[in-house]
Image: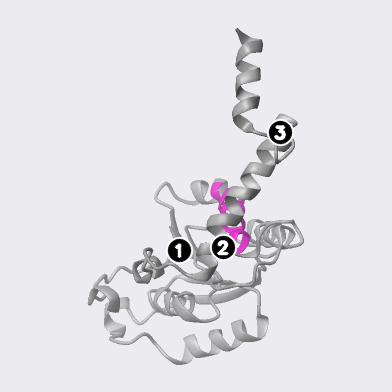
Amino acid sequence: MWFFNKTCTSKTCLDGKTVVITGASDGIGKETARDLYARGARVILACRNMEKANKAVEDIKSNPPSRFNKSEYKNNAGELAIYFLDLRSLKSVRDCAKNLLTNEAAIHILVNNAGVAAHPNEKTEDGNQTTLQVNHLGHFLMTLLLLPKMQKSSPNCRIVNVSSLTHFCINCGVTTPYRKANQHEYPEKLWNASCRLLHLEPEEDFTTFLETVSRQML
């Protein structure tokens, strides 16, 4: 990995292993698929964009990983397959998992790689914030659905959750207009919610309310 100035030196072959990688049409997912395919695995690209996924398959077959030595992997490339998966829809997650469970004899490795960043604050058809569902909830459901088959496939099955290092680049001490606004907006929302819970008017003195409640309890 360039961030740590290190490269993967493993020469493990994955003949006979089936790997599912979400979001494998480009980026880290695609390069992971490229490497595992070269090691002999049956690699399943679970993707939303079928056109990009098909192009990724062609590229992976045509271009082996950098520093690739065929003799290390017995010159035995694996297989590539594509399944449709849109993590913005939990129905799509269930459909994809159902297809995998029906069509694949075994699943040994699941790489939860797909994700979005800096996405507009929108909700999915399931009512969840899009980033939360794509990056977390969708993958949780996929893992939950595939786990029983993975455990039957091998006692040494693997689940890999790809995360981000972006938080290392953030200066949490920076005060932005957005953050300043939140410092006022969120306490006000919390206060209004508390008032509704306690059947208070927002302008009512909370101290007086507590004194009244205390007298009633005593």
**Residue tagged 1:** 17
How far separated are the C-alphas under marks 2 and 1?
52 Å
Amino acid type shown at disc 1: Lys
Mark 3 vs mark 2: give the one in front: 2
Is 76 magenta? The answer is no
- Image quarter in which the N terminus is found: bottom left
Query: Residue, x 28% and y 85% (percent of image)?
Result: 69
Q: Is residue 79 left or right of residue 199?
A: left
Task: Between label 2 and label 1, give the one nearer the viewer.
Answer: 2
The residue lying toward the viewer, choosing from 48 and 107, is: 48
Measure how far apart labels 3 and 2 are at the Cα level. 24 Å
Q: Secondary structure at mark 1?
A: loop
Side of 150 where 92 appears, left or right: right
Task: Answer yes or no: is residue 56 visible.
Answer: yes
Q: What secondary structure characterizes most of the magenta part?
A: helix
Total labels drawn: 3
Considering only order in the chain, which callout, 1 or 2, is on the residue closer to the N terminus? Answer: 1
Q: Which of disc 2 and disc 3 is earlier in sequence?
A: 2
Residue matched to label 2: 181
* Res. 89 image quadrant: bottom right
Residue of label 3: 197
Q: Residue at x 53, y 75 (%)?
A: 24
Using the image, determine if residue 166 lies above or below residue 105. below
20 w.r.t. 190: above or below:
below
- Gap between marks 3 and 1, in whole Å? 54 Å
Q: Which mark is residue 134?
A: none
Front disc: 3 or 1: 3
